[in-house]
């Protein structure tokens, strides 16, 4: 019996010792590189590091990979692709460079970063198109012409955001060097005595445990700040009124946490007022708070304000449309269209089935979606003057038939779909109430050409890199964007940072410390 008790005591002691070792191990992790964020920029960086057989820890606050890109349209701005050639629209870097610099210009500020623009237009075919098709990513044959582009450059991935992200994610797991830590929130950067970044302090969200991840290099890929309305308001462009109500359309975790962590260690933040917010926000049906929104549109609608009158050229040129919308009474408008236009109504990241079930056939969405068999009845349903709305639609149909928009110059002014709209005449008719929507951060953490973070004195911060929307996409867009450069520039900066970090680690191995 005594022997049994002794063995039992020793066994319990061993268990306690092992538990202590496990707990100690859980409180501290060591890796070759830490990537904070499993969106498209973070995945692109992790992929590059994996090619060099480097042990990578990817820390992600969400329960899965993908970030904002997973629910996006999966469209990329790329220069010089086979699809452009086959469509009769050959492209070249010089033409693209001129378009980028013109679209993103800022008369009172720096505008686009010329070095990064030059790299993007020259390398997007190799770094983005060739790389993705190597994973089996497929692009739709038709390349779409978007505002400020001389030729069509908007390449849509088959399968939208998921069709873009899944192949990258799968390839990151091929040799087991990339480990994902989901539901971990990065709260601060760790520094050694010399000031070099040496890791990240995190909270494990399931139990609140503090766990420190150590590595010689940290790559921040935490996304933008457009889901943090306090930051949005603080950095709002001075030349625009702040809307009475604005919906949140950034990623769920695009709360500016990366900006705060980087700023704490001395990083410089550039052009934070460069925000690309959309005028095409709809309240998300399933969101209990009522604050989150969807990005939605149909190119076959007209927009009317509270008086029932058109007030602008309804294009997808956000640089022009957003300021006009926020200057309307209440900062809202109604999109008016017919049953034919309903068939081509888009919601970013949604399938056709979801659009129908969650939007048009959802009784709980009646506050936002109004329908009627006549325009007059539609006006009554939407709280608009029936006579004014009837006159607005009548005049619009006349101008469509004549092929000229006498009011705002929309019809026939470009090759884009919205410049060749149909008449609004096939019932039932629809009115959807749209609002401003936060979307994309185009300013952020300053970086150099290797994605190393720059401090307020203009020096790089040892051991720290940043990529993607956290950096304002490296300034590729300047004040405004050519659509498709957000996902594109996220891939580009992620790959550049991954290669630069790998090169830095190789150099450190050769140099005694």
Image (cartoon, rainbow, N blue to C red):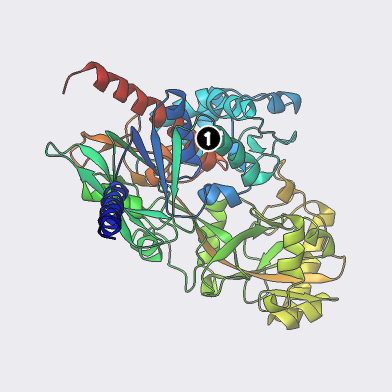
Q: Which residue lies most toward the left here?
A: 193
Residue at x 48%, y 33% (from the top left corner): 176
Q: Residue at x 73, y 73 (%)?
A: 362
Q: Is residue 88 above or below residue 206?
A: above
Quadrant including the N terminus: bottom left
- Is residue 506 shown left or right of residue 243? left
- Res. 124 image quadrant: top right
In which quadrant of the rendered view does residue 90 lie? top right
Residue 336 visible to an observer of this rendering: no
* Quadrant of the rendering where the C terminus is positioned: top left
From this viewpoint, is residue 439 visible? yes
Residue name at image x 74 percent, y 58 percent:
345
Left or right: where does residue 277 sit relative to residue 80? left
- 48, above or below 296, in the image: above
Left of 58 or right of it: where is 446?
A: left
State the residue at coordinates (70%, 42%). Answer: 414
| 196 and 340: which is toward the camera | 196
Q: Position of residue 395 (x, y in %)?
A: 78, 66
Residue 75 x %, y %: 62, 41
> Position of 11 compared to 56: left or right?
left
Residue 270 falls in image quadrant: top left
Whether residue 408 is situated above or below residue 380 in the rendered picture: above
- Residue 171 percent location from the top left of the image: 56, 32
Q: Position of residue 448 (x, y in %)?
A: 32, 31
Along the line of sight, the residue nearer the viewer: 135 or 486: 135
Query: What residue did someone put label 1 on?
Result: 173
In the rendered view, tell whether residue 22 sits above or below residue 197. Answer: below
The extreme right residue here reads 426
| Secondary element type, mark 1 | loop
Most foreground residue, 194 or 329: 194
């Amino acid at each position: 019996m005594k022997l049994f008790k002794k063995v039992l005591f020793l066994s319990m002691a061993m268990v306690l010792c092992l538990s202590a070792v496990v707990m100690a191990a859980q409180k501290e992790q060591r890796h070759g590189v830490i990537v904070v964020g499993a969106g498209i920029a973070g995945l692109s960086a992790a992929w590059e590091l994996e090619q060099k057989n480097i042990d990578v820890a990817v820390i992600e606050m969400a329960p899965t990979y993908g970030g904002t890109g997973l629910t996006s349209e999966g469209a990329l701005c790329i220069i010089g692709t086979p699809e452009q050639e086959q469509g009769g629209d050959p492209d070249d870097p010089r033409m693209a460079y001129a378009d980028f610099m013109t679209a993103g210009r800022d008369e009172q500020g720096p505008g686009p970063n010329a070095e990064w623009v030059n790299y993007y237009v020259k390398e997007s075919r190799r770094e983005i198109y060739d790389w993705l098709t190597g994973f089996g990513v497929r692009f739709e044959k038709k390349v779409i012409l978007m505002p400020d582009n001389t030729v069509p450059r908007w390449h849509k991935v088959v399968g939208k955001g998921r069709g873009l992200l899944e192949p990258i994610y799968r390839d990151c797991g091929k040799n087991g060097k990339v480990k994902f830590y989901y539901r971990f929130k990065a709260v601060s950067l760790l520094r050694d005595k010399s000031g070099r970044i040496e890791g990240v302090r995190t909270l494990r969200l399931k139990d609140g445990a503090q766990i420190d991840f150590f590595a010689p290099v940290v790559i921040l890929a935490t996304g933008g700040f457009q889901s943090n309305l306090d930051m949005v308001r603080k950095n709002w462009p001075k030349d625009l009124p702040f809307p009475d109500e604005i919906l949140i359309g950034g990623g769920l975790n695009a709360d500016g946490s990366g900006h705060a962590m980087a700023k704490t260690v001395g990083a410089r933040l550039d052009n934070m007022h460069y925000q690309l917010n959309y005028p095409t926000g709809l309240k998300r049906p399933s969101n209990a708070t009522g604050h989150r929104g969807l990005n939605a549109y149909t190119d076959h609608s007209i927009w009317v304000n509270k008086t029932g009158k058109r007030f602008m050229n309804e294009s997808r040129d956000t640089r022009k449309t957003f300021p006009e919308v926020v200057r309307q009474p209440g900062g809202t408008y109604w999109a008016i269209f017919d049953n034919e236009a309903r068939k081509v109504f888009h919601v970013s990241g949604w399938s056709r089935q979801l659009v129908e079930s969650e939007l048009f056939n959802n009784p709980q969405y009646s506050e936002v979606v109004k329908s009627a068999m006549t325009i007059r009845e539609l006006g009554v349903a939407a709280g608009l003057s029936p006579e004014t709305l009837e006159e607005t639609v009548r005049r619009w149909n006349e101008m469509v038939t004549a092929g000229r928009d006498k009011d705002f110059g929309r019809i026939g002014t470009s090759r884009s779909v919205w410049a060749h709209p149909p008449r609004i005449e096939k019932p039932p008719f629809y009115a959807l109430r749209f609002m401003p929507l936060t979307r994309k951060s185009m300013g952020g953490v300053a970086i150099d050409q290797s994605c190393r973070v720059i401090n307020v004195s203009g020096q790089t911060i040892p051991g720290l890199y940043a990529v993607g929307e956290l950096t304002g996409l490296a300034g590729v867009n300047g004040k405004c964007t050519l659509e498709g450069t957000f996902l594109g520039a996220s891939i580009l900066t992620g790959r550049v940072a991954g290669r630069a970090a790998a090169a830095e680690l190789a150099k450190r191995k050769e140099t005694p410390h």
